[in-house]
Image (cartoon, rainbow, N blue to C red):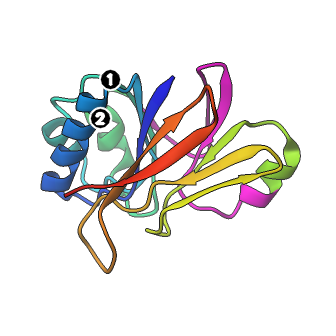
Amino acid sequence: MLIGVLSDTHDDMEMIRRAVDFFNAKKVKLVLHAGDIVSPFTFPEAFINLVPRFAGVFGNNDGDKVLLTEKSGGRILQQPRTLEEGGKKIVLMHEPALIPSLVKSGTFDIIIYGHTHRPDVKKENGVLVLNPGKTARLHKGKSTVALMETDTLEAEIHQLI
């Protein structure tokens, strides 16, 4: 199952739209957001054309969680969030502090996080650990998203242009 992953969109409407277009073109089945959309009003405007299903978690910059939950139709929840997709157990979170414990637990096949604004793809003890980087054009670095294949536990970082 092909899954699109993004994080730290920080209200950058243009880059969110580019990510939506990218995921739609790649025909992903699901998009996971690892936190920091920021404004509740960004969700319905920027993600309106997203074709695949969507699930996300709150990040440290998401202020009005009640309204963001409402605007997302309940698709953004507290972290860590667990899902089972493509036969794999996934944990989705924003901050990376729990990664060592989650890897050691042996409970999950995939750990997705955000917050650092740095892309990261690695395997630890057979667990895929993935940070898609930041989608927003803030600070230094490139605007990126990730594509992840649950069948192979492989992921690639893609720069949004």
Q: Are marks 2 and 1 in contact (CB under 8 Å)?
A: yes
State whether residue 32 is above or below residue 73: below
In front of the other: label 2 or label 1?
2
Number of the label disc, if any, that sits on residue 63: none
Q: Residue at x 38, y 56 (%)?
A: 36
Whole-Å distance between the Cαs marked 2 and 1? 8 Å
Q: Residue at x 50, y 69 (%)?
A: 116
Check disc 1 and give the amino acid type. Pro
Q: Quadrant of residue 62?
A: bottom left
Where in the figure is residue 10, as x and y percent of width and height?
28, 61
Q: Residue beneath label 1, please?
A: 52
Q: Residue beneath label 2, please?
A: 23
Report the span colored magenta: 75-100
* Label 1 environment density (alpha carbons within 10 Å; few <14, some 14–19, many ≥20): some
Where in the figure is residue 100, as x and y percent of width and height?
79, 59
Which residue is at the front of the view, 114 or 45? Answer: 114
State whether residue 22 is above or below residue 6: above
Which residue is at the front of the view, 111 or 160? Answer: 160
Q: Quadrant of the C terminus?
A: bottom left
Judged from this view, the residue extending furthest toward the top is 87
Q: Is residue 85 magenta?
A: yes
Element at badge 1?
Answer: loop
Where in the figure is residue 39, as x and y percent of width and height?
24, 53
Q: Is residue 96 magenta?
A: yes
State whether residue 124 is above or below residue 151: below
> Can residue 41 be seen in this snapshot?
no
Who comes first in sequence, dot 2 or dot 1?
2
Where in the figure is residue 29, as x and y percent of width and height?
40, 22
Check disc 2 and give the amino acid type. Phe
Judged from this view, the residue extending furthest toward the bottom is 140
9 left or right of 13? right
